[in-house]
Every structure is written in structure tokens, then in C-alpha cells.
């Protein structure tokens, strides 16, 4: 496919990313999902037998926790506005919400820390993301960033290793506070926020596992991992950031391939709207496969597919390859294998 941006894509890129109508539509699409808010202090992960790894089981367990309040009081601080004031920008928060001791025959005994990532605005984030990492994961992130960006990491402290007492409540509490401070610092500096080190830390493990599930055609197992990654990246970056768009495309392709889910149409709608302002050449290679997926999906659910077919014809007239393209799923799988 010819991925060079043409005049059509340049016009798309010129649109305002913060356009009110698009933002409202996207918020509606995201808010329409089942509420996964966590009840403060009750997060508990119980790994189901026979799962591929801990990550998928944890995310599934997290999504089933009863609704409730998250974190700080939405009426306090900078999370909202009153008396007609303009609302402040939502605040990105990293919170270690639980820690558990892992003592398995295949792994050295260690503490696994569960980090909830949320973006609180006037109200608490209704769809937080969650990851579980151990001390060595945080240490690798910290040391990698110190080597690559020494000036940006000046003054950042990291919890020290201890010879004994790793499982003591005081040590766990101190480390949790240090991990939260580290992650929040990284998001304040653009170079750190965009670093490959942070991207790998936040989603690498789950992305690799999701890819393995997709190769095995177990899309039902991949979807929770992919949705969690999309939610997390969507909080960290802008809506049309390449990492966010790729995560959304993976989620659309996987949901479309799974006959048991009803989320494909909703996420496909969201992807189409966001692509209207995308000019990144690497992302545009997935635009035609996305349109073709949506044509088939719209026909299946009884929606009018003619506007999408007209869009494909227009792209074809402008010299963009339309016929013979791989499916969205195949294109993404091929990219992830390279």
C-alpha cells in the first residue's frame, strides 16, 4: 500500500484534534462500556486455574470487582470545578492498590505490586487500567532511563534493595510510594513519557501474551489484555498517538474475530472517527484494512455500509491501493512478528 500522506490525509491532519463534537462522541463510546470501577480497598486478584499467565487472569478478576469509589474524593482538589468554573485538565494517577507474595516453584519468591492507572477529571475515571509488576521490573525501568536520560532523572530516588525483609509491610509500603513517585515523574517529561523503556514496562508483557493468544486464535483470551493496554495508553498519550491507534486497531481486529463479543462495532466506530485526523504514514497502512473490516461488520449488523464503500472508492481514485490488501488482523499480526 502507498503509505505516503496525500492531500486527503493532509486535510485530515489539519483538523483540530480537540474538536468538541468528536470528543463528545468518543466519550460516549467509551462511557458506554460496562462500568469497571473498583471499590476502594477491595481489589483482589485470584488467578484462575489453567490460564496462560497471571496477566490475563488479573485483568479479568479486576473487571469483575463491584462498582464503587476510586481513589480520591472527586469533589476535592483539582479533580473538578464548581460555580461555573472551567474544569481543569484530568489528572493522570498511578496508584499501587495491592501487593501479593508470589511463591511458586517456577519463580523465586517475590512481591507482585498491582498498579492502577487512572485519569481523574470532574469524576473519578470509570475505566482504570491495571498492571502487575515486581521490584525487578521497576528497577530495570529506572536504571534504563537513568542511562538514556541522565539529566531528566536527576534527583529521582528509587527504593533500595534489602538483604532481608523484602516481604515486611513497611518495606512494601515504602516501595509502593517510591514506585508511584517514579511513574508520575516519568509522565511529566515528554522524552520520558515517549521512551521505549516506559512503553515496554507498561504494555510489553501483556502485548506479547495477547499476540500468542491471537496466533492460537484464542481471541477471547487476547481481548481483555488488548483492551487494558488500549485504556492505559489512551490515558498516557493523546487520542491519536501512534501507540494508542495501534492498540485500538488491535482491539478492533481481535473483537471482530471473536464471535462471542459484542464490542467490535463500538471500538470500530471509535477507530474510524480517530482516523479522520491521522496523517502518520505508519498508521495509514492500516486505514484501508480498517475500512474494509467495517464494511463487512456494518453489513453483518445491518448498518448502511455505502458511505464506507464510497470512501474506499475515493481512496482508490487517488492512487491508494485498495484491492488485495491483507485483513486488519493479518496486517497487525505481520507487523508484530517483525
Image (cartoon, rainbow, N blue to C red):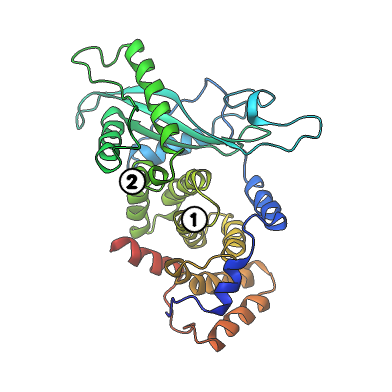
Q: Where does the N terminus fall, quadrant-wise? A: bottom left
Taking 282 as reference, is 186 above or below it? above
Q: How many numbered discs sit on the rendered protein? A: 2
Is residue 295 something one can see in this rendering?
Answer: no
Where's residue 128, x and y in %? 54, 37
Query: Label 1 near label 2: C-beta < 8 Å?
Result: no
Q: Residues within 10 Å of mark 1 (few under 14, many from 20)?
A: some
Q: Is residue 76 left or right of residue 138?
A: right
The answer to which of 248 and 277 lies nearer the viewer is 277
Residue 241 circle label: 1
Where's residue 238, x and y in %? 53, 51
Q: Where does the C terminus fall, quadrant-wise? A: bottom left
The answer to which of 129 and 107 lies nearer the viewer is 129
Residue 200 circle label: 2
Residue 123 falls in image quadrant: top right
In three-dimensional space, the C-alpha distance between marks 2 and 1, rounded to whole angstroms, equals 16 Å
Q: Mark 1 falls on what kind of element?
A: loop
Identify the residue at image location x=46%, y=51%.
223
Taking 176 as reference, is 49 above or below it? below
Is residue 232 something one can see in this rendering?
Answer: yes
Residue 80 falls in image quadrant: top right
Q: Mark 2 falls on what kind of element?
A: helix
The answer to which of 318 and 301 lies nearer the viewer is 318
Residue 72 circle label: none
Q: Nearer the viewer, mark 2 or mark 1?
A: 1
Identify the residue at image location x=29%, y=62%.
337
Amino acid at each position: 500500500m502507498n503509505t505516503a500522506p496525500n492531500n486527503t490525509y493532509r486535510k485530515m491532519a489539519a483538523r483540530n484534534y480537540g474538536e468538541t463534537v468528536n470528543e463528545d462522541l468518543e466519550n460516549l463510546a467509551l462511557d458506554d462500556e460496562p462500568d469497571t470501577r473498583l471499590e476502594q480497598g477491595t481489589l483482589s486478584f485470584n488467578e484462575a486455574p489453567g490460564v496462560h499467565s497471571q496477566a490475563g487472569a488479573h485483568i479479568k478478576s479486576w473487571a469483575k470487582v463491584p462498582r464503587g469509589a476510586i481513589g480520591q474524593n472527586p469533589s476535592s482538589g483539582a479533580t473538578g470545578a464548581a460555580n461555573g468554573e472551567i474544569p481543569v485538565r484530568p489528572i493522570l494517577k498511578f496508584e499501587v492498590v495491592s501487593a501479593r507474595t508470589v511463591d511458586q516453584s517456577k519463580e523465586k519468591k517475590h512481591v507482585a505490586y498491582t498498579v492502577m492507572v487512572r485519569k481523574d477529571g470532574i469524576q473519578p475515571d470509570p475505566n482504570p487500567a491495571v498492571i502487575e509488576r515486581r521490584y525487578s521490573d521497576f528497577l530495570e525501568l529506572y536504571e534504563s532511563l537513568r542511562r538514556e536520560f541522565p539529566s531528566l532523572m536527576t534527583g529521582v530516588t528509587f527504593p533500595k534493595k534489602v538483604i532481608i525483609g523484602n516481604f515486611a509491610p513497611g518495606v512494601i509500603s515504602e516501595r509502593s510510594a517510591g514506585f508511584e513517585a517514579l511513574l508520575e515523574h516519568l509522565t511529566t517529561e515528554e522524552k520520558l513519557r515517549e521512551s521505549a523503556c516506559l512503553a515496554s514496562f507498561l504494555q510489553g508483557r501483556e502485548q506479547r501474551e495477547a499476540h500468542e493468544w491471537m496466533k492460537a486464535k484464542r481471541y477471547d483470551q487476547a481481548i481483555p489484555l488488548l483492551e487494558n493496554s488500549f485504556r492505559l495508553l489512551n490515558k498516557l498519550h493523546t487520542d491519536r498517538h501512534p501507540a494508542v491507534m495501534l492498540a485500538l486497531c488491535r482491539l478492533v481486529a481481535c473483537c471482530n474475530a471473536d464471535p462471542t463479543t459484542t464490542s467490535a462495532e463500538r471500538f470500530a466506530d471509535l477507530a474510524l472517527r480517530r482516523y479522520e485526523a491521522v496523517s502518520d504514514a505508519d498508521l495509514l497502512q492500516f486505514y484501508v484494512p480498517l475500512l474494509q473490516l467495517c464494511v463487512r461488520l456494518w453489513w453483518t449488523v445491518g448498518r448502511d455500509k455505502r458511505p464506507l464503500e464510497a470512501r474506499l472508492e475515493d481512496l482508490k481514485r487517488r492512487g491508494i491501493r485498495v484491492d488485495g490488501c491483507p485483513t486488519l488482523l493479518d496486517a497487525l499480526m505481520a507487523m508484530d512478528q517483525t
